[in-house]
Amino acid sequence: MADPLSGIPLASIRVFEAAARLKSFTRAAEELGMTQAAVSWQIKALEGRLGQSLFRRLPREVQPTEAGERLSSASTEAITLLRRAITDLTEADEHILSVTTLATLATQWLAPRLGAFQLANPGLAVRLDTNPALLDLNREGFDIGMRSGHGDWAGLESQMVMPSVFTPLCSPAMAERLKLKTPADLIEAPRIGLEKEWAVWFAALGLSSEGRKQSTRLTADYQVLEVAAALGDQGVALASPILFAREIAAGLLVRPFEEMVSFHTGYYLVWPEGRRRSPKIKRFRDWLMAQADADPAVIAARAGTERRTVDKAREPRS
C-alpha cells in the first residue's frame, strides 16, 4: 500500500495547522512569515491533493470542516512532537534555558537565587521572562515556567515548588499607628488589594467586612506594587510571607497576625509533556526544588498551611 504522506509536502501541513488553529489565513501568514496569498495557495493545493474541502470560508474567519477538524487535531499533535524532538536534539539550544514566570515571583524569590545556579552551571545561560500571560511553552520557545494555580495545565507536566499563601503585611509605623491587637482591627484599617480577597481572609477567621465603611484604597496588577505601597505607609497589604521574607527579616515589614489564606494551591514548576528528561530542565528542576526545600519561609508556610487556609480563585495578578 502506498504511503499516503508521500505526495503531501510537510510545508502544506504546517500551513494548514496554523490556519486551523488560528481560524484565519491572515493570522497564519503573520505567524509563519508568509503572505496571505501563499497560505491560501498552500491550502488549496492540499485540498486538491486530498480531494475534499478542509475549510468553510466565512467573511471574517475560516472554520475547519469535519475533515479539517480531524486533520487539525492530528497535525497539531504531530508538529508539537516534532518541535519537542528538534528542540531536544539541537545542541546549541542546550546552552540556553528559557524560563517564563510571574513578575513578583521573579523579582522577590527567583532572580536573587539565579546567580548560584549559573555559578554551578557555567555553560548554561538563563533567559528570564516575566510575561503575565499563560504562555504556550512549546510555541513561544520556553523550556520551563513557574505558574500559580493547581498544577493541572493541558500539555504540561508540573511539580509544586511552594504553597501560595497570603497574610497581612504593613510597615512597623503603620502597625503602631493602627494599634492592631486583633484581626478585627483590620476591618476599619486602610487596606491595599482587592476587597474580595480581603473578604476571604476575614471569612477564614470568622469575620465579615461586608457593609463596613472602610474598604481597600489601592489595587495593582503586581503583588510587588501593592507591597511597595505598604512599605510607603499607605496601608496594609495582603501578600506572600515567602516572597517578602527578606523585608520581614529586615524589619521593613511586619506580620501583625499569623493567619494565612490560599487562593490557589501553590507555585508550580512546569515544562512541556515529554521533556522531563531534558538535561537542562532536570538540572534546573533539581536545583530549584533544593532551594525551596532549604528556604525557612517556605518551610514555615508549608507547616502553616496545615493550620488555616482557604482555597479560592485569585485574580490573575503576579
Image (tube, helix red, strand yellow):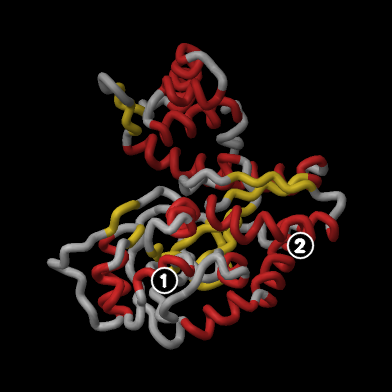
In the image shown, does 166 or 3 lie closer to the viewer? 166
Q: What's the distance in space between the residues labelled 1 and 2, CA to CA?
A: 43 Å
* Mark 2 surroundings: few (<14), some (14-19) or many (≥20) residues within 10 A: some
Q: Is residue 228 left or right of residue 219?
A: right
**What residue lies at 56% left-to-right and 57% top-to-bottom?**
105
Q: Amino acid at mark 2?
A: Arg
When asked about the image quadrant of residue 62, the answer is: top left
The quadrant in which residue 306 appears is: bottom left
Q: Is residue 116 left or right of residue 236?
A: right
* Residue situated furthest left in the rendering: 211
The dot on residue 48 is none
The disc placed on residue 283 is: 2
Disc 1: CA contacts within 10 A as few (<14), some (14-19) or many (>=20):
some
Residue 77 point in image, percent of width and height: 53, 46
Question: In the displayed structure, would residue 198 be above or below residue 203?
Answer: above
Left or right placement of residue 317 versus residue 195 in this view: right
Label 1, secondary structure: give it.
helix
**Which residue: 66% across, 76% down?**
293
In this rendering, the answer to whether 245 lies above or below 58 is below
Q: Position of residue 181 (x, y in %)?
A: 35, 82
Q: Which mark is residue 175?
A: 1
Q: Which comes sooner in the sequence, label 1 or label 2?
A: 1
**How many callouts does the rendering have?**
2
Which of the two residues, 122 or 137, is positioned nearer the viewer here? 122
Quadrant that contains the N terminus: top right
Is residue 121 something that shows in the picture?
Answer: yes
Q: Position of residue 177 (x, y in %)?
A: 38, 69
- Identity of the residue furthest to the bottom in this view: 307
> In front: mark 1 or mark 2?
1
Residue 7 in sight here: no
Residue pictured at 67% horizontal, 62% vertical? 276
Amino acid beneath label 1 = Ala
